[in-house]
Amino acid sequence: MIVNQQIALDHGLKKDEYKKICVLLKRIPNITELGIFSAMWNEHCSYKSSRLHLKNLPTKGENVIQGPGENAGVIDIGDDDAIVFKIESHNHPSFIEPYQGAATGVGGIMRDIFTMGARPIANLNSLHFGSPEHKKTKNLLRGVVHGIGGYGNCMGVPTIAGQTSFDESYNGNILVNAMTLGLVKKNKIFYSKAAGLEKPVIYVGSKTGRDGIHGASMASSAFDDRIEEKKPTVQVGDPFTEKLLLEACLELMTGDSIIAIQDMGAAGLTSSSIEMASKGKLGIEINLNKVPCRESNMTPYEIMLSESQERMLIVLENGKEDLAKKIFDKWNLDFAVIGKTTNSKKIELYFNKEKVADIPVDTLVENSPMYDRKWEKTKLPKKIKINKKQFKDLKVTNILNKILSNHNVCSKERIWQQYDHTVMGDTIQKPGGDSGVVRVHGTNKAVAASVDSSAIYCWSHPLSGGKQIVCESWRNLISVGAKPIAITNCLNFGSPEKQENMGEFVECVQGLGEASKFLNFPVVSGNVSFYNQTKNIGIKPTPVIGGVGLIKNYKNMITMDLKQNGNVLFVVGKTEGHLDQSLFAREILNEKNGPPPEINLFNEKNNGETILKLIDKKLIKSAHDVSLGGIITAVCKMCIKGKKGVTLKKPNYLINQFEYLFGEDQGRYIIEIEIANIKNVTEILENNSVHFDELGIINENELIIDNKSKVTIDELSKSHTSWLTNYMSK
Amino acid sequence: MNSTVITFPGSNCDRDIDVALKKFGFKNKMIWHDDIELPKSDLVVLPGGFSYGDYLRCGSIASKSKIMKSVIDFAKSGGKVMGICNGFQILVETGLLPGVLLRNKYLEFVCKNVFVKINNKNNSYFKSFKKDILELHIAHNEGNYFCTKEQSKEIADNDQIALYYSDKDGKIDKDNNPNGSLKNIAGIFNKEKNILGMMPHPERMIDPALSGEDGSIFFKNLITDLK
């Protein structure tokens, strides 16, 4: 087949991109080469629309060992231990085929982690579905949850936290983001940079099939009516093989055989071989006849673009082939020497003794397109004047039951019960808390992790929204007593070719960068997912942040369940009563306009650090950050978890009751204190100039809001759990 | 006390049970499924996980692996063999224990704390147990125990039911059955009571910082009673 412009366009390349390829090669590429270019230059692999903006993110810090650019980020947690972590999207495949899409998303991210020598110790996920009433939602939800469980459970890695939310903007494009944390010794981290000439290039893992060809290209375009036709581009996962691959790789990694290792993820053998060569400034020569294939008569084009799962590419030290082969034989995995490193700085592929591709590596990587896309700035919406007269007809307890059973607030236990969250025996905080927490096996340390997003805020004002999620992640870590260390991000947006969507991306990233810089909470890894749209309708901008923090002594971990009758609750941080874009305004008042709450980074940092001081001094019995649904929703969750009630106090300043209870001002925490410690806590808060209000006292089993409104915790608990149980049972 | 844990390809609770056995005083050895000889053991444990990816049927391929010949011989000569979760499924597939483990009634994987009531203490696993009810953890997709009417009568007649799912006060009913298992069965013995298969994971409850500590009671008792 002779390549022409039309074939290039069919591969998702643009006219001028095709022209550029011909110029760089000084000839017309053959079909295999064109396939390789299209895979390397698509949005998913090349970050061509996002690179320019991502480089402004803060990526360095005293605990950062490895920032973006590797398979995952690495942070130092002391005593020679390091945590490797990353989040990644698998949105498009999950919408087409929810079980396999979600499963291979989990498999892919775990491979990124153990490629670096780390044993995965925790999984998290962030899921966004369309409106619960939409005809596709329930099946997608079921399929995705089964897929995540099917893969993660089999691997024996606990799923310790996550979020599931619903919004009509995801009706035609759901989001499935998966995150994994791994543990490694600092001196045993493996990288993807090839080094040395004439070193054997090894293929291990599953055989290569025709599945997933052009998966990465599919993830780089919008959906249309012919979505069913794209099913073959979804990969099929086999967690059993991945478990064997994990054990085999870690076994080989105990020695010194490996020079570089890279998993075959998006764009399979193409991107893995090119990344290794590019980082090592080397060439790689591959004999495609040596690649273990599952199907007969596979062409070089298919072999290079297959996204079959559970495969790795390794550059070995000379003479270590037999030792390595023995290990992979033991685990019943394919092992083949398929090529070698060269000094040509080219990717040279042979098939049936013919050269089928000859491409300089730099044309694929350094010379890949980069765009400065046009984008639109979003103005801060005007504050809406809510008519407070309408509050007179509202009954707080009714609203509360409504909010607790709202699909974005309600308990997600029915979901996380389907994930093994206790395997490995170190999960000390299960899903449903502010962060999931696992111990570092055999030590007193523990690692906390949380995933967060606030699409409503980001949609209303991307700059504020971008800041807010970083702060929310920070608060969720602090609420369990962890010192926040670093974040990973998964940036889910619509089409970068639309100015409005590109603007959302640019400003969210800007906000995210500002907050992470101020909080000294750097970004060490991440992933961008554009084209989350069907036809012309894009999703709400949904950057997802995965935060990781350290608890030095796991015995000092904090949970949110109320502990003791008679203890006092404080709300730390100032409550102004910001209702615009709050759950109360949107769901109860049906008011969808106005700006999101303001972020004050100074207060955020100061409040958080002071809470950590209090935890350090063992002055806090339970803690929970205030987010969606305001103070009252946060209090209810603490009551439900601890099976205790609270008698609320009136605020000692003038503020409308609804604004006080349901406002979503940022930077706030609710903390439980023993009466004997009130003086001590008050002093520390005052000395650090942290605003706080006394919120109430813990009682047996009732939430008492004022003389007229009280409700039992049992009733609240029912409201909180019944929605999802009913939804998933029918 | 010497214990042996068998690791199959796809086992994933092998480390957890190793940690638990050692914590409570066992000298534990890990043995690979492809090995032939079983070391001298007072207890052999088949751990949880997804041996052979649960292909064909859970536990069926593992039941035919090399080491299992020795395990079966050991069990038939009266040796103590315990299977947890996937280990239970393997024991059922070898025929050492009666019945089968079907998919959970609601067709969903379930991971949560449950209460189990000990039904029979007249054996070396629960002999000196002071408590009747334990809070343990389950995590499985196929824990729905089922057997024929004849088998059901036989295991009842021989007092082979080890554990029932119950509430915290020991009430055994449908509301406290997490997977639809026959009679709320969570674990059974063979006729001679030297082989125990159970779905709950005591090894996940051996530390107050984890979900609970009733697993500790289980292992402390186990090492005393096996002596």
Image (cartoon, rainbow, N blue to C red):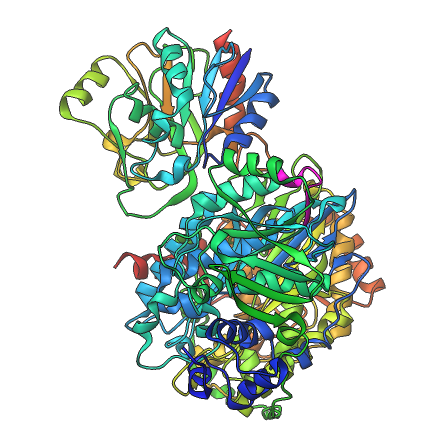
Q: Quadrant of residue A270?
A: bottom right
Q: Is residue A75 above or below residue A470?
A: above
Figure check: A722 above or below A78: below
In the image as oriented, which residue stretches furthest toward the right?
A: A687
Q: Is residue A327 left or right of residue A226?
A: right
Q: Residue at x 57, y 86 (%)?
A: A502
Q: Position of residue A229 (x, y in %)?
A: 31, 73
Residue B36 picture location, percent across and down: 45, 17
A482 sits left or right of A528 in the view: right
Res A295 → quadrant: bottom left
Q: Position of residue A678 (x, y in %)?
A: 74, 53
Q: Nearer the viewer, residue A584 or A387?
A: A584
Residue at image x 67%, y 37%? A254
Is B195 displayed left or right of B207 in the figure? left
Q: Which residues are magenta?
A: A252-259
Q: Is residue A410 above or below residue A502?
A: above
Whether A87 is among the magenta residues is no
Residue B33 is at least partly visible in this image: yes
- In front of the other: A661 or B74: B74
Decide if residue A704 is in sight here: no
Q: Quadrant of the C terminus of chain A?
A: bottom left
